[in-house]
Amino acid sequence: MAKAKKTPRILIALNCAVCGAQNYLSEKNKTNTPDKLKFIKYCNWCKKRTEHKESTKLK
């Protein structure tokens, strides 16, 4: 069996701040960026560019 990597990187989801839909998945380094990420990205449900916030709950 393969060993699990022991890195500080975690998997995060980016949720739309307007409608709450989970649109993107990404990774981040927890030691370098301890605060929550915010991006302005396109939401397929709102049909416009909105702010997306980090969430650790993956759907």
Image (cartoon, rainbow, N blue to C red):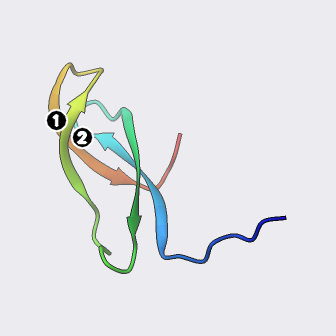
Using the numbered discs, state the Cα–Cα distance from disc 1 to disc 2 in whole angstroms: 7 Å
Q: Quadrant of the N terminus?
A: bottom right
* Secondary-structure class at tag 1: strand
The image quadrant of residue 12 is bottom left
Drawn side of residue 48 relative to residue 12, left or right: left
The reply to whether the C-beta atoms of the residues labelled 1 and 2 are less than 8 Å apart is yes
Q: Badge 1, how many Cα within 10 Å: few under 14, some, many 20+?
A: some
Q: Nearer the viewer, mark 1 or mark 2?
A: 1
| Residue at the disc numbered 2 | 17
Vertical position of residue 4 compared to residue 42: above or below? below
Q: How packed is label 2: few (under 14 Cα within 10 Å), some, or many (20 or more)?
A: some
In the depicted view, which residue is nearer to us: 13 or 9?
Answer: 9
Task: Specify the farthest residue to the front.
Answer: 2
Q: Residue at x 39, y 36 (%)?
A: 22
**Corner quadrant of residue 45:** top left
Disc tally is: 2
Determine which of the numbered discs, if any, sits on residue 20 in the image. Answer: none
Q: Looking at this view, is 19 or 9 the one in front? A: 9
Name the amino acid, label 1: Thr
Q: Secondary structure at mark 2?
A: loop
Q: Residue at x 21, y 31 (%)?
A: 42
| Mark 2 residue type | Ala
Residue 19 image-quadrant placement: top left
Q: Is residue 58 above or below residue 35?
A: above
Residue 55: image location, x then y, percent? 39, 53
Farthest residue toward the bottom? 31
User: Quick one: label 1 or label 2, which is nearer the N terminus?
Assistant: 2
Q: Position of residue 47 (x, y in %)?
A: 20, 19
Residue 43 against residue 37 in the figure, above or below: above
Instruction: Name the residue that disc number 1 marks.
Output: 50
